[in-house]
Image (cartoon, rainbow, N blue to C red):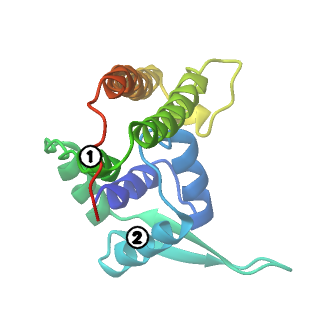
Amino acid sequence: MVLKNAVLSLLTFRAMSGYDLKKMLDSTIGHIWSTTQSHIYKVLHELESTGLVTAKEIEQRGRPNRKLYTITSKGEKELQQWWTTPLECDPVREAWLIQIYFAHLLKNEQITHLFEAKLQELEERLATCEEQKPYSSDTTPPFTDLLDERMHELRQMTIDFGKAYYQFQINWHKKALDRIKHLPPMENKEE
C-alpha cells in the first residue's frame, strides 16, 4: 500500500520509467522507505491493471524499449484520498528483538555481540540521514525545478525524524549494553 502511493506520488511530478522511479525513490524518500526494482515493477503492473497509471512504450535504438508511466485522474483521486487519511502507527515489528527476548540461552558475550552489530548498523543509518543535505541553490537534487520551499521544509521534517529515530535507538542500545554487563550468569544445564 505504501509503495503504491509512493510511486503514484512520484508520478505527480512527471512521467517516469520503473528505472527512473527507483532512482527518484532512493534519492527522495530512500532515507525513510526503501524497496527493490522488482517491487516497483510489480506495483507498476498493478497500478496499470487498475487504471491508476497508463504506460506508453518508447522505442529506443540499440536498447530495449522503455515504458513511461503517467498517473491518471483516477490515480490522482486515489492518491488525494490517501494523502488526507491519517495512517495508523505501524506496530513494532523487530525480528532481532525476538532474538533478544529468547537470548537467555546465550552467553552474555554472545548477546553483547548481537547488540554491538545492531549498534553499528544503526550508526551507519544515522550517518546516512545526516548526509542528507537541505536543498539549496548549490545542490542539484532530482526535480529541483519542481520543488518549492514548502516541499523543502516537509522533506527536512522527514530527515529530522530519521535522525531522531536512529539517535533514540542508538541511545537505547548503549543503555541495554550496560544492562547486559549486569545480567546474572547463564545457568549451566546438564544434558
- Give the distance between the C-alpha atoms of the residues marked 2 and 1, in whole angstroms: 42 Å
Horizontal side of 134 relative to 152 (left or right) equals right
Q: Residue 47, percent across and down?
A: 36, 72
Q: Which residue is mark 1?
A: 104
Residue at coordinates 45% horizontally, 20% vertically from top-left?
149
Q: Which residue appears farthest toward the right when viewing the image? A: 62
Q: Residue 122, percent across and down?
A: 48, 33
Q: In this picture, is 133 found above or below 15?
A: above
Q: Which residue is mark 2?
A: 43
The image quadrant of residue 164 is top left
Which kind of residue does numbered mark 1 sit on?
Answer: His
Residue 132, disc: none
Q: In this picture, is 143 found above or below 96?
A: above
Residue at coordinates 48% horizontally, 25% vertically from top-left?
148
Residue at coordinates 23% horizontally, 44% vertically from top-left?
83
Numbered disc total? 2
Horizontal side of 150 relative to 90 (left or right) equals right
Circle 1 Cα neighbour tier, 10 Å, few/some/many (<14 / 14–19 / ≥20): some
Judged from the image, the secondary structure of the residue bearing numbered disc 2 is: helix
User: The C terminus lies in which quarter of the figure?
Assistant: bottom left
Q: Which residue appears farthest toward the front when viewing the image? A: 190
